[in-house]
Amino acid sequence: MGSWRSANYEFCCEAGRLSSLRSNLGPGLPLSGRSGLRRPRMYNPVEMTTPAALLSEEEVRRYRAAALRLEEQFREENARLEKLGWETARAAAELLRGKFQAGRVAVFGSLIHPGLFHRWSDVDVAAWGIAPDAIWRAIGAAMDLDAPIPVNLVVVESARPSIRAVIEAEGVDV
């Protein structure tokens, strides 16, 4: 069979879905524009892989070596991001102390737990002593901080008691 696209097309034709789909749509109408019609189910374009029990020892060895390399790359990337996260937290603390007179700034969440900070993490920062009329500006300034990692600011005085308890228990001052 050629590519996965031709295999997918042949499967759709065999199942009769493509022709019935076209007849339901009418000329030139998009799939999403008609109520009651669903988009066709997408099939995995990757061919079926060999079960692990059928791999040769050499294939298993190569797989394990590649998996270890990939795991090491993830560890290195996460360590780099964790360092960048702390730099971002310090920049946020400087901003909050300087512009919004925060009395105390602490980091909590995944950044304070080694190995948990990853590419989808944000920097969770808690601040005490920001004036009530400046809270939204402080949150906006923290979010707009020119940093590669997003900052999530919690003003402790206005936080829910459950969040406040976590911050008090695990927060690390910066």
Image (cartoon, rainbow, N blue to C red):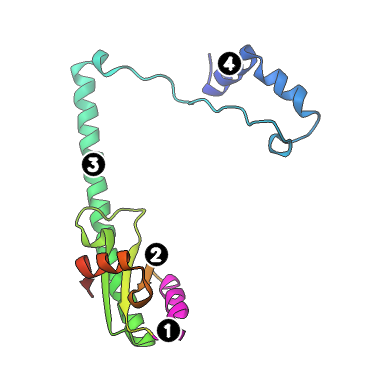
Point out the tag, 1 or 2, that comes first from the N-terminus. 1
Residue 128 in percent (x, y) is at 31, 80
Mark 4 Cα shell of 10 Å, populated few (<14), some (14-19), many (≥20): some
| Quadrant of the image occupied by residue 13 | top right
* Mark 2 lies on residue: 150
- For label 3, the SS is helix
Is the stretch drawn in magenta largely helix, strand or loop? helix
* Mark 4 lies on residue: 11
Which residue is outermost to the right? 27
* Mark 1 lies on residue: 132
Mark 1 Cα shell of 10 Å, populated few (<14), some (14-19), many (≥20): few
Is 142 magenta? The answer is yes
Point out the tag, 1 or 4, that comes first from the N-terminus. 4
Question: Disc 1 vs disc 2: Cβ atoms closer than 8 Å?
Answer: no
Residue at 62 percent across and 14 percent down: it is 15
Residue at 34 percent across and 57 percent down: it is 121
- Region of the chain picked out in magenta, as a range: 131-145
Q: Nearer the viewer, residue 159 or 170?
A: 159
Return the mark for residue 71: 3
Pair 1/4: label in front: 1
- For label 2, the SS is loop
- For label 1, the SS is helix
**What's under tag 4, amino acid-wise?**
Phe
Pair 3/2: label in front: 2
